Image (spheres, rainbow, N blue to C red):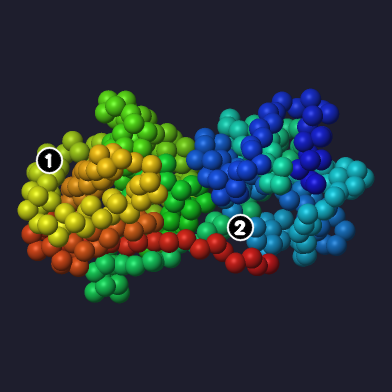
């Protein structure tokens, strides 16, 4: 295998690196999520045959879908073939080593490390991209690949806004921490979708509200959960800021943390009104609780009745705080909420089911996205 040969080459030449091996029981999805939520960049290596005679190896970010037409354009060649799953002979491998290409996205993280993955053996090679470039005398090229995923509208509420929601100048994009819908390839798909439709976007990072999840699922005390939640929010932005920069030529992305919005003077007013609605409108209360019950359903068999009620109460608190934050942003003239997931209660509010709900929430347009893997193509 190519990756094995590369590892052998690195070891034999005493190139500084680290080998990380995960359990064989770790699924592809789990592995992808673990690496794409780390501070490192996941990369793949692939061998190509150029113009039917010359071989080369390319290191490419695993966030991208390899497109051979883009490869031809980037390398300025007439024909290119991807050499799949081959046992490379030593002579051929030595030839490949003289023609190494590295994606510009990987080259720009010179001071960070990234992983080269051997999927079958669950082996990851951890190495600085600057060391990789120097060791292999690699050429840097912008392959301009697309993300592995494509984001599409799952549903939009109210339906009456389906044809005109893109006329707005801005939207806000909700980010849930430690959520698989925000691993790097899926995040890129969401940003691609947004940047094609809105000139500006406010990215709402759910730091402070994530404390509620940490209290319920990890048993942390309120202070510890709050500190960890704010830390995770900062880490997310630091880790993914360069991903947002990839789309800044199309859309102006700005960032705000939930902890900031919760300091706005109108936040507490909205939150108090939502608490009153929750107590007074049994239908609204049932909807909020049902969402929490669905979210925690997998944990239900392991929880006592008291623990179960605690989890549902925490989920209800989470949604009321979150909805108050959304109302603050709507009041500041950001009318479209984009999120890769489902908000049943918020959709019901937007569709007019709860007449006494906050006007700011009833006037929102809610866009729910879902992901599809791009079809393999040349």
Let me know if residue 73 appears in the view. Answer: no
* Label 2: element kind: strand
Q: Is residue 362 left or right of residue 259?
A: left
Q: Is the residue 157 above or below the residue 303 in the image?
A: below
Screen quadrant of the C terminus: bottom right
Q: Residue at x 13, y 62 (%)?
A: 354
Q: Is residue 295 above or below residue 260?
A: below
Q: Residue at x 61, y 57 (%)?
A: 65
- Going from the N terminus, do you reach mark 2 or mark 1 first? 2
| Position in image of residue 331 (x %, y %) | 16, 52
**Residue at image mark 2:** 65
- In the rendered structure, the answer to whether residue 148 lies left or right of residue 310 reads right
Crowding at mark 2 (Cα within 10 Å: few <14, some 14-19, many 20+): many
Q: Residue at x 21, y 58 (%)?
A: 287
Residue wearing tag 1: 268
Question: Which of the two residues, 8 or 298, is positioned nearer the viewer here?
Answer: 298
Residue 324 seen in this snapshot = yes
Residue 42 in the figure: left or right of residue 176:
right
Q: Assess disc 1: are there few (<14), some (14-19) or many (≥20) residues with their C-alpha within 10 Å of its C-alpha.
A: some
The residue nearer to you, when weighing 78 against 38, is 38
- x 52%, y 59%: residue: 149
Query: In this rendering, is residue 170 above or below 155?
Result: above
Q: Position of residue 292 (x, y in %)?
A: 28, 50
Q: Distance of mark 2 from mark 1, alpha carbons?
A: 45 Å
């Amino acid at each position: 295998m190519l990756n094995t040969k590369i590892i052998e080459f690195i070891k034999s030449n005493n190139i500084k690196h680290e080998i990380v091996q995960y359990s064989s029981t770790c699924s592809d999805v789990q592995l992808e999520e673990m690496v794409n939520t780390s501070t490192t960049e996941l990369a793949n290596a692939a061998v190509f045959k150029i113009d039917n005679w010359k071989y080369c190896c390319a290191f490419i970010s695993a966030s991208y879908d390899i497109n051979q037409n883009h490869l031809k354009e980037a390398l300025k060649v007439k024909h290119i073939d991807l050499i799949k799953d081959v046992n490379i002979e030593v002579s051929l491998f030595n030839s490949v080593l003289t023609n190494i290409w590295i994606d510009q996205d990987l080259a720009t993280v010179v001071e960070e490390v990234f992983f080269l993955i051997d999927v079958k053996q669950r082996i990851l090679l951890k190495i600085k991209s600057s060391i990789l470039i120097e060791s292999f005398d690699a050429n840097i090229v912008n392959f301009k690949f697309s993300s592995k995923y494509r984001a599409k509208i799952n549903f939009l509420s109210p339906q009456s806004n389906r044809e005109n929601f893109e006329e707005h100048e801005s939207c806000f994009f909700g980010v849930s921490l430690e959520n698989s819908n925000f691993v790097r390839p899926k995040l890129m798909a969401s940003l691609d979708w947004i940047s094609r439709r809105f000139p500006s976007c406010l990215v709402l990072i759910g730091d402070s509200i994530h404390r509620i999840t940490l209290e319920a699922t990890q048993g942390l005390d309120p202070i510890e959960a709050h500190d960890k939640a704010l830390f995770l929010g900062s880490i997310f932005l630091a880790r993914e800021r360069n991903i947002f920069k990839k789309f800044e030529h199309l859309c102006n992305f700005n960032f705000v943390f939930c902890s900031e919005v919760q300091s706005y003077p109108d936040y507490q007013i909205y939150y108090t009104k939502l608490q009153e609605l929750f107590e007074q409108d049994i239908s609204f209360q049932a909807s909020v609780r049902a969402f929490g019950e669905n979210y925690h359903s997998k944990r239900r068999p392991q929880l006592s009745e008291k623990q179960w009620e605690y989890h549902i109460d925490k989920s209800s608190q989470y949604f009321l705080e979150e909805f108050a934050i959304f109302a603050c942003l709507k009041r500041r003239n950001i009318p479209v909420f984009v999120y890769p997931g489902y908000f049943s209660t918020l959709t019901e509010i937007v569709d007019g089911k709860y007449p006494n709900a906050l006007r700011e929430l009833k006037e929102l347009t809610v866009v729910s996205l879902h992901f599809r893997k791009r079809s393999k193509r040349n």
